[in-house]
Image: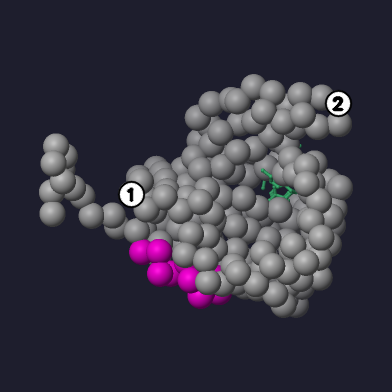
């Protein structure tokens, strides 16, 4: 039905795939849907000082809060979260999340955090590409957005490599350890050119 005063376009988004999210299999990483079974790993990750700083996370979380968050994730129609695991032995590396589903505007936001002991081995790049492919090809999104703080050039580099483009800077968006830090807004659109995981695999 066409609403008064406007052209109605059906959304291409399929939120049902965010409930009971599938496992995503890459070359060096495996993304397993997060649930309560990942309580210990998730609680340890969100307590890591460097993860808290780089993600600008001020609040601390009790084990009960983490458990509650993980317990409801599998049934949330507006977000999906995965444990990032090494392909070789299934070991936990960190987590990656699509959240804030906006159905009419076909968009979500992205965040990722790997444990400080697991950085620089290509896991973040591959996990990001897998989730972008899922968001665009399976969920049917048009836009995926994120923010990255100016003191995190490694993450900004990985995001650019995966196809995110800078949109703007929110000045002094974070106050951390006595200093103001800018936040950089980035996004990638379904219509942007980016290295797709299927092609990356056959390079
Ligand atoms: C950001 C993050 C997901 C990246 O994942 P990762 O597995 O460490 O990254 P990868 O190994 O896939 O790639 C690292 C890339 O960054 C580059 N890099 C490393 N340090 C860098 C720096 N200081 N400046 C610019 N680039 C840098 C590496 O050279 C590599 O690029 P290349 O593959 O083109 O050579 C991960 O580091 C992480 O979770 N960090 C902690 C939390 C965090 O920062 N989360 C993001 C918040 S926005």
Query: Which quarter of the figure has residue 191?
Result: top left
For the residue pair 181 and 65, the one nearer the viewer reads as 65
Please give left or right for residue 73 compared with residue 94 in the image.
left
The verdict on residue 119 being magenta is no
Counting other residues with Cα less than 10 Å from the Cα at mark 1, is it few (<14), some (14-19), or many (20 or more)?
few
Image marks 2 and 1: residues in contact by CB distance under 8 Å: no
Report whether residue 109 is seen. yes
Q: Residue at x 69, y 23 (%)?
A: 172
Please give left or right for residue 35 compared with residue 162 in the image.
right
Residue 182, compared with residue 65, is above or below; it is: above
Residue at the disc numbered 1: 104
Residue at the disc numbered 2: 178
Please give left or right for residue 143 compared with residue 121 in the image.
left
Q: From mark 2 to mark 1, how far is it between C-alphas?
A: 40 Å
Q: Earlier in the sequence, mark 2 or mark 1?
A: 1
Give the x, y percent position of residue 99. Answer: 54, 54
Check disc 2 and report its element: helix, strand or loop: loop
Report whether residue 193 is seen. no
Give the x, y percent position of residue 20. Answer: 51, 75
Give the x, y percent position of residue 163. Answer: 50, 44
Residue 3, compared with residue 97, is above or below; it is: above
Range of residues picked out in magenta:
14-24
Please give left or right for residue 31 compared with residue 106 in the image.
right
Q: Residue at x 73, y 36 (%)?
A: 152
């Amino acid at each position: 039905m066409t609403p008064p005063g406007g052209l109605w376009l059906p959304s291409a988004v399929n939120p049902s795939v965010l409930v009971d999210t599938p496992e995503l299999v890459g070359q060096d990483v495996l993304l397993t849907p997060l649930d309560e079974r990942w309580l210990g790993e998730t609680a340890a990750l969100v307590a890591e000082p460097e993860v808290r700083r780089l993600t600008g996370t001020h609040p601390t979380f009790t084990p009960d809060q983490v458990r509650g968050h993980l317990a409801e994730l599998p049934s949330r129609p507006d977000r999906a979260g995965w444990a990032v695991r090494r392909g070789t032995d299934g070991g936990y590396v960190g987590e990656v999340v699509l959240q804030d589903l906006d159905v009419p505007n076909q968009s979500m936001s992205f965040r990722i955090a790997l444990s400080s002991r697991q950085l620089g081995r290509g896991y973040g790049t591959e996990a990001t590409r897998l989730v972008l492919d899922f968001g665009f090809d399976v969920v049917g999104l048009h836009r995926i957005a994120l923010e990255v703080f100016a003191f995190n050039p490694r993450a900004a580099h990985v995001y650019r490599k995966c196809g995110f483009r800078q949109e703007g800077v929110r000045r002094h968006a974070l106050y951390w350890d006595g200093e103001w830090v800018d936040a950089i807004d980035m996004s990638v659109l379904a219509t942007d050119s980016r290295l797709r995981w299927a092609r990356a695999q056959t390079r």
